[in-house]
Amino acid sequence: MKKLIWFGVLVLALASLASAQQFRTFPQIKKSGKILIGTEGAFPPFNFFDDQNHLKGFDIDIGNAIAKQLNLQPEWKAHAWDTMLIALNQGRFDFVIASHTITAERAKAVDFSKPYYCTGNVIVTKPGGPLTPEALKGKVIGAQLGTTFEEFAKQFGPKQLKTYQTNPDAVQDLMMGRIDAWITDQFTAIEAIKTRNLNLKVSGLLNKEEIGMAVAKGNSLLLAAINKALDDIQANGVYAKISDKWFGQDIRCK
Amino acid sequence: MRLWRLLFYSVLSIIALVAGYYLFFYGIEFLLDEYLLFTHFTAEKVPHFAHSLRMGAEITIKLTVISSVTGLILGLVSGIARLSKNPFARLPAQFYIWVIRGTPLLVQILFAYNALPFMLEPVWKYLRPLGVPPVQDILTPYWAAFIALSVNVGAYNAEVVRAGIQAIAKGQWEAAMSLGMKPFQVMRHIIVPQAIKIVVPPLVNNVIALLKDSSLASVITLLELVHQGQRIISITFRPIEIYVAVAAVYLILTTVLTIFTDWLERTMNRRGAASA
């Protein structure tokens, strides 16, 4: 009889764990004074590790500005890209700022903030390689796993689509000639070419994407707070300064 | 007459193997299909997902088979070389075993895919004009993984072979040599047939481990089972169901492999017992 009771207790305990809300709500976050922010760290110039192994980038600066606006101490966590939104729902971070494109599929899993910048995809290739959507047909395309770049590349009818754990892996294969073209964000492409002095060509913008910050599904108070903080920094010039520092222009969605 | 019978049975077994292979993977895809529908994945996408996972499983099995066969040969040669009196055979073998067992398989896989092409550049400069395709067309994720996996399992197999040979009593060597046999003849007729009984179980173990180690090739973009699973998860955001499916397929594959290797072990033991 005693064993049965203990077993029942165990089952109830596990069940409660399963149904327990895993993320921290805004009141809980405010009480702790700290906000956990998730990012990737392999997507320059938005989020990357510098040579001192510190997280740097546009996303980092915006994230820090939002935390400051909310009077909270930011604590950053780097995470693998393709499972980041899953980790967000598990409560490993309070919000994610890692240049996620807002898509209907993703919006089913997490809640997105208002877009904090707009950008577009480009094709990057060696000189003489395919630079237009039509030229990509039958070629080998590389893109990061779990990105809109990967989805986007599929529509060009490539001979083969290679998916990489990170963008720098894709650049490496492009330089080695294993892929004919790399699909990525316009600013990432420019940054990669600039910092490593690569001889690559970039196409024009192929589409428009809205980039948002993400919170766990249902974390509405935090979402509202982040949206307000974003409005504030876009109004008071903090956003403009950060954008100018990284891109020489204001990249918010017009 | 015996030649015809041998030919007939060989052709029959090849046909049976190929048919069995396709039937087996058709079954896997069917099971995956039913599972994904049962767990409420979008119905139009389910056939595509099930098919992707099946293709991943096929690549995993094919990679495992060719890597284990090559690794077996590598292990046999280096295990025996390791015991040779000749330092030109013994020292390279010892070095190979030491380095490969002392470094992580993941590093070896990344090395084969990312570093080897650069190291082979000087050699390829001379081979290109002869019409040999560029090094990156040959060192594809599949073949880079094959090289890393066979070299890795070869080192572990070498130690198993060495232990098996050393387990045979020295008295056998002495008796055989006193009959005037040369070392190679002793190996071939006396030592190796007895050593086989000892080495087959651990060698088989290494093959089962290799099947699971092949999952590391996902980081060099090989579309094996794990990577296919990662792609589906990044689209559907349902890690639990997909990881369970991937793990289940690995379990099925290792179980089938274990059944086959158990049969192999029993056959070897019967043969060994018969000849002893």
Image (cartoon, coloured by chain):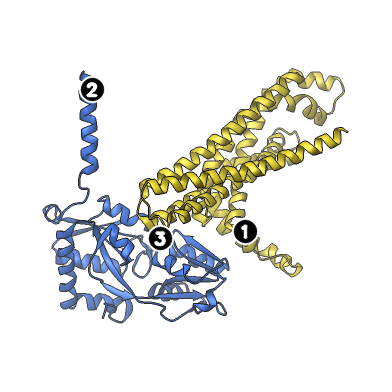
Chain colours: A blue, B yellow
Please say if A13 is above or below A71: above
Which x, y percent locates residue A222? 17, 60
The chain ID associated with circle 1 is B
The local secondary structure at tag 3 comes to loop
Please say if B168 is above or below B61: above
Have a look at marks 2 and 1 and say if they share a chain.
Answer: no
Picture residue at 60% right of the left edge, 57% below the top = B116
Within the image, what quadrant is residue B167 found in?
top right
Q: Nearer the viewer, residue A173 or A133?
A: A133
In what quadrant of the picture does the N terminus of chain B appear? top right
The chain ID associated with circle 2 is A
The local secondary structure at tag 1 comes to loop
Picture residue at 21% right of the left edge, 34% below the top = A13
Q: Nearer the viewer, residue B98 or A232?
A: A232
Disc 1 target residue? B139
Please say if A3 is above or below A127: above
> What label does residue A4 carry, if any?
2
Q: CA distance from mark 3 to mark 2?
A: 45 Å
Query: Which amino acid type is marked by label 3?
Result: Gly
In what quadrant of the picture does the C terminus of chain B appear? top right
The mark that comes first in sequence, 3 or 2, is 2
Judged left or right of residue A109, residue A222 is left
